[in-house]
Amino acid sequence: MDKQSLRSHVFDSLRKNPQAHFHTIEGEIRQQADGFERHDALTLQEVLWELLVQGILAPGKNSMNLHLPFVHVTEYGATCLDSGSIIAHDPEGYMHRLHEHTQGRVESGVVQNAAEGLRAYLSGHYLASTVMLARAAAILLSRLTDTVLPEAQQSGRDMDRLSPPTPSSPDALAELPRILARRELPDELAHDVAPQIASLSALLRRVHSEDGTARTPHPSRDDVLAHYLLFPDQCRFVYALIDDLEVHRAS
């Protein structure tokens, strides 16, 4: 079995039994997962150790069994399992979600930077993770701005003030909502223009100040997790908006 499939089974097992033994988890997956073979036990061990490193699990089951291979779900882990934010601890599943939300249109640069940032997050490097996701957001917004620029040609003032965004120029996005407000967008897009662009701009501003110089944020684990959970929907919004603009331009 591949690691993503095993990870999904582990999550299901931990939801039912938040205090467990490695062998208990393995036994349950053997019974419930089609295709589990003896050599998959090694991959399962990798998954469990990764979850320990990531803070989803911690050693010990109770006061009488404080050490490995007994484990328990941490408070953070329980929150992730209950809320669905555990997807951030499933890198393959998260990348699949990016592709699914954009119907496969998400660009390789967005995926590569988001994937690298997610690996940093899972290793506890929250600053590096934020920087990499901001790079992914900048590529995404640059793609949107490239699409909107022809829409702004009716106003020379708009063209002067709108330029493709980069991590060093987050304020270049300020004109996007005003230009898009003049478009007849579907309601589900029109209502999301301001909040979605503001959210992506805020991510850029976490790593660059208003004058474009690098900023060194000190994000918490929860801060970074929130950005990653929002990002697939932000990607979906941007590509849906691009589709609408391009369809109307062609008509």
Image (cartoon, rainbow, N blue to C red):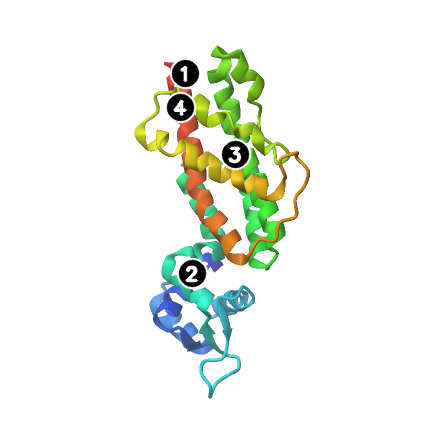
Residue 178, percent from left and from top: 45, 24
Q: Secondary structure at mark 3?
A: helix
Mark 4 and mark 1: span between their CA atoms?
A: 16 Å
Q: From the viewer's perspective, is the residue at label 3 or at label 4 nearer?
A: 4
Q: From the viewer's perspective, is the residue at label 2 or at label 4 nearer?
A: 4
> In which quadrant is the N terminus drawn?
bottom left
Q: How many circles with numbers are drawn on the protein?
A: 4
Q: Which residue is mark 1?
A: 249
Q: Secondary structure at mark 2?
A: helix
Residue type highlighted by circle 2? Cys
Q: Which residue is mark 4?
A: 181
The reply to whether discs 3 and 1 touch (Cβ–Cβ < 8 Å) is no
What's the residue at 36%, 67% (across, down)?
15
Observer able to see residue 151? yes
Residue type highlighted by circle 3? Leu
Q: Which residue is mark 2?
A: 80
Above or below for 224 versus 20: above
Q: From the viewer's perspective, is the residue at label 4 or at label 1 nearer?
A: 4
Mark closest to the chain's N terminus, 3 or 2: 2
Q: Is residue 6 left or right of residue 188?
A: right
